[in-house]
Amino acid sequence: MGVVSDIVEDADAFSIFLVNAREGERDATFEDVKDRLTEVLKNQKAKVLYDALLAEAREKTYVETRLDEASGADARQCPRHPCPDSR
């Protein structure tokens, strides 16, 4: 008790911890982890759906990028829908 940790660095800050008390090790109950577990499962399902949507969009989308050699600028073509700024 009363032990000060080393400096702990993460992406946003530096932290120092003071140990005031210790609890013995124990297994977590379902009630302890239910909210976190629900969040993790929702995020996993959302990622699967997002990845499928992205793959479908990439499959259906045509993109062509050309380099205009004379000017050195990008010339983008949209063959199905002529864009006002396309060359």
Image (spheres, grey):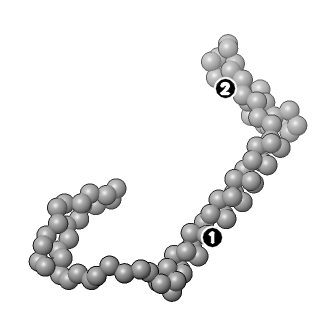
On screen, residue 83 versus residue 23, left or right, reads right
Q: Nearer the viewer, residue 44 or 87?
A: 44
* The one of 63 and 40 positioned closer to us in this rendering: 40
**Does residue 45 sit above or below 64 in this rendering?**
below
For image coordinates 77% across by 26% down, the residue present is 87
Please determine whether, in this image, residue 79 is positioned above or below residue 37.
above
Q: Residues within 10 Å of mark 2 (few under 14, many from 20)?
A: few
* Residue, far top: 70
Question: Percent position (x, y) of residue 74?
Answer: 66, 26
Which amino acid, mark 1?
Lys
Residue displayed at 28% across by 82% down = 24
* Residue 30 falls left or right of residue 61: left
Q: Residue at x 41, y 80 (%)?
A: 27
- According to the picture, the residue beneath numbered tag 2 turns out to be 74
Assign a secondary structure to mark 2: strand
Q: Residue furthest right?
A: 80
Direction bottom: furthest residue: 31
Give the mark, 1 or 2, whose residue is nearer the N terminus: 1
**Alpha-carbon neighbours of circle 1 within 10 Å: few (<14), some, or many (≥20)?**
few
Name the residue: 86% across, 39% down. Answer: 81
Toward which corner of the image does residue 23 lie, by quadrant? bottom left
Q: Is residue 72 left or right of residue 87?
A: left
Up the image or down, 61 lies above or below 46; here it is above
The residue closer to the viewer here, 76 or 39, is: 39
Amino acid of disc 2: Asp
**Circle 1 sits on which residue?**
42
69 w.r.t. 26: above or below:
above
